[in-house]
Image (cartoon, rainbow, N blue to C red):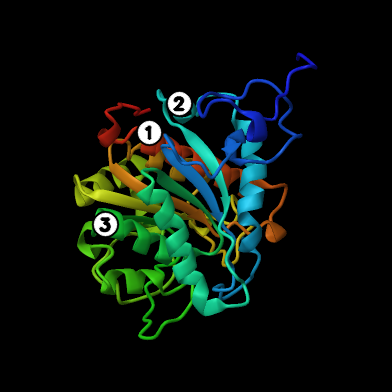
Amino acid sequence: MNQDRDWDNAFTGEGLRGKIEHGPSFAGAQSFLRRKFSRNLAGVDVAVTGIPLDTATSNRPGARFGPRAIRMASSSMAWARPYPWKIDPLEELNIVDYGDCQFDYGDAASIPPFIEKHVEGILQAGAACLALGGDHFVSYPLLRAHAKVHGELSLVHFDAHSDTWPDEGNRVDHGTMFYRAAKEGLVDPARSVQIGLRTTNDDTLGFNILDARWVHEHGAAAVARRVREIVGDRKVYLTFDIDCLDPAFAPGTGTPVCGGLSSFQALEIIRGLAGMRMVGMDLVEVAPAYDSGDITAFAGATLAAELLCLYAASPARGKDGSS
């Protein structure tokens, strides 16, 4: 390596595309996939932003540290095209790390609208948003921001939990946000899918559910086909709660549930969704304090990179990036 070269792309990158093939992954600023830190959204295709909220958590807190852990894990993944994709999001998309949403943690009522405004600014600038949680409640203000721009959405939701428990008030709770999203018309349950569920909630609110047993019985390819049938050509918001994975693959999360998906199954399902009209995405509930050997953070970073592939392969972008 040229010792005179200034290799910290997070600060000194001149362009917004390209793999980072120089400099050690264990040093330097930990931006997501070593993208440049920037609040300048001119010409940006995707802004990656952290939402470090975990006060909506019902079990083990700590997901506020998720964005930091995911960024750190991603630093070793910026040197090559994600396998086995034919399209490289780092070559096809102008991506920046937009930093974290800086809300007032002591003023709970102000947090949801603040997150919504934060992401709305990204969307109004013409960029898409990849959000890194934080607990899963953050998807609610994210969906509100996206619905303002794109209208009613189809939700593709990977999780161990339905997160549709009733909320007739104004709770900040990571188990109720999709109840509110459905009731407010942000998403259409009949054209949405929940994948990997394995906790009891008898009221489905009309969501199509491919629970963990269905996934294990039918396989990743069948899941992807069924999702595409349900969603059709509608605009899609994809949210991935890391506890969709079995705790063997993702112990570092607040509410782990046994019997979940393997990393391979989740990755194969996502790859099978290439061609959907993706407009927004998030990866949530990484809680590094409960992790082992950073395997949850690496799973989260890998899945987040796959979501960028999925966005790069969106038909709205005119690319065929299927694996």
Q: Point out which mark residue 234 bears.
A: none
Q: Secondary structure at mark 3?
A: loop
Q: Secondary structure at mark 1?
A: helix
Residue shown at 43%/48% (left/top)?
Answer: 129
Residue shown at 39%/43% (left/top)?
Answer: 127
Mark-to-mark CA distance, 1 and 2: 8 Å
Horizontal arrangement in the rendering, residue 311 relative to residue 22 (left or right): left
Q: Which residue is mark 2?
A: 88
Q: Return the x and y of residue 123 as percentages of the image width and height.
A: 38, 50
Label 1 or label 3, whichever comes before in sequence order: 3
Tell me, yes or no, whether the two marked residues, 1 and 3, touch with CB atoms within 8 Å: no
Label 1 or label 2, whichever comes before in sequence order: 2
Identified by mark 2, the residue type is Asp
Mark-to-mark CA distance, 3 and 2: 26 Å
Q: Is residue 311 visible?
A: yes
Depth order, front residue of 60/135 = 135
Outermost residue, top side: 2
- The quarter in which the N terminus is drawn is top right
Tell me, yes or no, whether the two marked residues, 1 and 2, touch with CB atoms within 8 Å: yes
Identified by mark 3, the residue type is Leu
Q: Which residue is mark 3?
A: 153
Q: Return the x and y of residue 71 as percentages of the image width and height.
A: 63, 44
Task: Please tell me whether residue 293 is drawn above or below residue 138 in the rendered image.
Answer: above
Residue shown at 52%/57% (left/top)?
Answer: 284
Q: Which residue is mark 1?
A: 312
